[in-house]
């Protein structure tokens, strides 16, 4: 079994990106836990919550896995100021770069839901690609920190480039993509708490070199937790789309997410009723697997409209251009998403 000594030895070549000294030399390793080759580390670094930290995560995970770990969990905290000064560190110089929050041209659209499992990320991805197919400049932030899935859904295998303190998003289907999933090795857990989580999201707006976007889609975590509240406070002018299934309970829970949007004076563009029905390819008959009425009832409660009823289905898999959750424009469900994109554009640019 892997030992603490082997873990420390593996980390010897890995340097703090700000101090340019070994993590071992600066005493960055505050805690090591090993259980059946599953390694959990707590690291103190000079500047947590930055683009450089995300690069460091990859280096740490790779180093410890090469030493024999099956999985690596990381927690970060700030190295004490006196330790930073002792090792020649100073306050970070802000690298000039544009913030997406200052771009008056960009419309932010948050896609939210009351509970998980209703297809919110699928809606986010297909709305983003449909808007891009309409000729719009589009980005997507996978802000579902713990349930990130956008890179896998879009078939993205490359990573963003980090140059200095700027992150360059990955482009796929003409959509610029940034996700926490890009900075995690092999689904290794990264633990984020409180202010660190908010700072990470803030970095996605301020440290990413976005193009001049027309629309930025935010795939929010389900519910009304800290991440959703952070987004609401960062983006006072955001629009919102609420995703539900036809089931009455899902719609009831989704109403909470919509109510929070209304309280923070965000404009709700509409409701998406996902998994609305199953349509038989043989007979064309529709079966309402999860019941009926949830979407219209939610729209009525939130004083908005149903933008689309999306049936159960799956995109045709193209092995050469693999993207397991992106519908082609000629697919029946793809056509629904294209119509939905037209509605969204009409409401915003109308």
Image: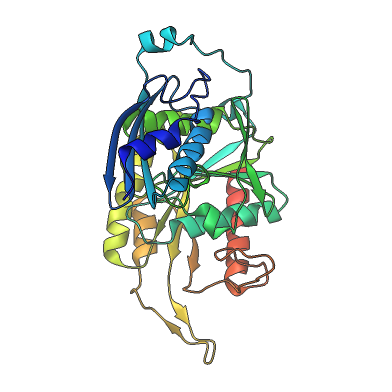
The answer to whether residue 74 is visible is no
10, 86: nearer the viewer? 10
332 vs 291, left or right, is right
Q: Residue at x 53, y 30 (%)?
A: 51
Percent of width and height locating residue 221: 38, 47
Q: Residue at x 49, y 27 (%)?
A: 50
95 vs 83, left or right, is right
Looking at the image, residue 319 lies above or below residue 62: below
**Residue 281 falls in image quadrant:** bottom right
Q: Residue at x 63, y 55 (%)?
A: 129
Percent of width and height locating residue 274: 44, 65
Looking at the image, residue 21 lies above or below residue 296: above
Looking at the image, residue 138 lies above or below residue 80: below
Q: Residue furthest bottom?
A: 283
Colour option used: rainbow
Q: Residue at x 60, y 54 (%)?
A: 157
Badge count: 0
Percent of width and height locating residue 341: 61, 55
Q: Residue furthest right?
A: 135
Which quarter of the rendered picture does the C terminus lie within? top right
267, 52: nearer the viewer? 52
The answer to whether residue 57 is visible is yes
15 vs 301, left or right, is right
Percent of width and height locating residue 273: 43, 63
């Amino acid at each position: 079994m892997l030992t603490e000594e082997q873990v420390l030895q593996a980390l010897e070549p890995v340097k703090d990106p700000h101090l340019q000294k070994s993590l071992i030399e600066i005493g960055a390793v505050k805690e090591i836990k090993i259980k059946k080759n599953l390694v959990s580390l707590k690291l103190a670094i000079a500047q947590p919550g930055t683009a450089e930290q995300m690069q460091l995560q990859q280096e740490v995970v790779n180093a410890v896995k090469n030493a024999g770990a099956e999985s690596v969990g990381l927690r970060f905290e700030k190295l004490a100021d006196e330790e930073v000064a002792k090792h020649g560190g100073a306050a970070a110089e802000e690298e000039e770069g544009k913030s997406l929050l200052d771009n008056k041209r960009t419309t932010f659209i948050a896609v939210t839901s009351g509970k998980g499992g209703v297809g919110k990320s699928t809606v986010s991805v297909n709305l983003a690609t449909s808007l891009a197919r309409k000729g719009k400049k589009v980005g997507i932030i996978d802000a579902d920190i713990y349930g990130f899935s956008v890179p896998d859904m879009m078939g993205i295998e490359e990573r963003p480039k980090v140059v200095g303190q700027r992150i360059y998003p990955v482009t796929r289907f003409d959509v610029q993509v940034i996700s926490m999933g890009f900075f995690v090795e092999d689904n290794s857990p990264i633990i984020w708490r409180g202010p660190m989580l908010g700072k990470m999201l803030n970095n996605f707006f301020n440290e990413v070199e976005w193009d001049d976007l027309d629309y930025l889609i935010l795939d929010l975590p389900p519910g009304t937790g800290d991440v959703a509240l952070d987004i609401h406070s960062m983006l006072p002018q955001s629009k919102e789309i609420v995703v539900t299934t036809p089931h009455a309970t899902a719609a009831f829970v989704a109403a909470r997410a919509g109510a929070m949007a209304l309280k923070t004076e965000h404009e709700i563009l509409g409701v998406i009723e996902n998994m609305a029905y199953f349509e038989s390819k043989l007979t064309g008959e529709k079966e309402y697997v999860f019941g009926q009425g949830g979407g219209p009832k939610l729209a009525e409660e939130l004083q908005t409209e149903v933008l689309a009823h999306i049936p159960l289905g799956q995109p045709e898999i193209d092995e050469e251009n693999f993207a397991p959750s992106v519908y082609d424009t000629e697919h029946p469900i793809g056509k629904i998403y294209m119509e939905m994109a037209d509605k969204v554009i009409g409401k915003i640019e109308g």
